[in-house]
Image (cartoon, helix red, strand yellow):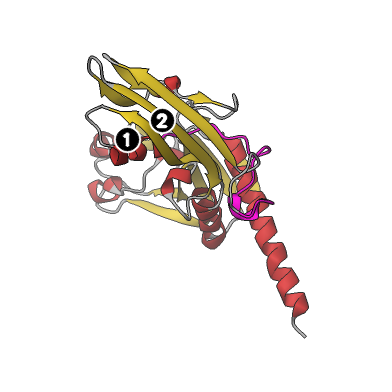
Amino acid sequence: MEMKQLSKDKEQITFLVKGYSPAETNTLRRIMVNKVPTMAIDTIEVIENSSALYNEMLAHRMGLLPLKTDLKSYFISEKCKCQGEGCARCTLQLTLEAEGPCIVYADQIKSMDPKVIPAHSKTPIVKLLENQKVKLIATAKLGSGKNHMKFSPGLVFYKGLPQIKIGKVSNPKSVVAICPKKLYKLDGSKLKMTESTDCTLCKACVDASDKGIEVTASDKDFIITIEPWGQLSPKEMIESAADTISAQAKDVIDAIKKIK
């Protein structure tokens, strides 16, 4: 197996994986989306709410706020020593108190753990008019996307590495113009590729060239894109997914050993 980073910015990271099968690639994707745990608000005790949003809608909005997550300090409640009853090892209290007129933003939420705070501070929660108030206590816990998508750390998708073969093309200018990613250029009258990894496999060039160009996707090399929602970094998502896969493989081995 070989990995190479292709691009990285504030919103996503893209890397190339070589020597992987489609099943292995999809397993990595599913584990990151469904099994890598993050913190999210799970319950809310509303003390006062005179806003236009009723309690259930306010709770829904707060539950979907991505919270920065410290995986070393918390345990999934089912695996905690308290057996899911709720303790400082698996839950965290946050409070919110505001009075209008104002727009209440996520950074107004006070957390008992400075490491676990809203990932996007200026996410609006509710608008308060004059004399309207919101006061509540929220409880966050560590969970996985398998149980609720609010615990999922981000979006992960992949594609087979594009493999493009340029044959005899009678209308190279049309191919250059039709490519949505602008991956082709003219070298004199000859058609050339600029960067095949950016290809979306739409095959518009195949149709424009009357099949003078062949576009296929590799079933051994894949381009994986991770778009985290703020709870964890892409590196933390990959490392946690790898640990989860390793733990599940160990569980299978242990189960097989018990078979007589």
User: In the orientation shown, which residue stands out farthest toward the bottom?
Assistant: 260
Q: The residue tagged with tag 1: helix, strand or loop?
A: helix
Observer-nearest residue: 125 or 10?
Answer: 125
Residue placed most toward the observer, 179 or 80: 80
Left or right position of 109 against 76: left
Residue that protrudes farthest toward the front in the picture: 47
Which residue is denoted by mark 2 in the rendering? 136
Q: Is mark 1 in CB contact (under 8 Å) with mark 2?
A: yes
Along the line of sight, the residue nearer the viewer: 228 or 13: 228
Residue pointed to by mark 1:
58
User: Residue at 68% of width from left, 69% of height from top?
Assistant: 252
Taking the image as shown, residue 64 lies to the left or right of residue 40, namely left
- Left or right: residue 145 versus residue 233 is left
Mark 1 surroundings: few (<14), some (14-19) or many (≥20) residues within 10 A:
some
Which amino acid, mark 1?
A: Leu
Taking the magenta stretch, the answer to whether it contains residue 41 is no
State which quarter of the image contains the C terminus. Answer: bottom right
Q: Position of residue 108 (x, y in %)?
A: 43, 20
Kind of residue at disc 2: Leu
User: What residue is at 70 percent from the left and 66 percent from the top?
Assistant: 251
Residue drawn at the location 25% of the way across and 27% of the way down: 51
Q: Which residues are magenta?
A: 64-83
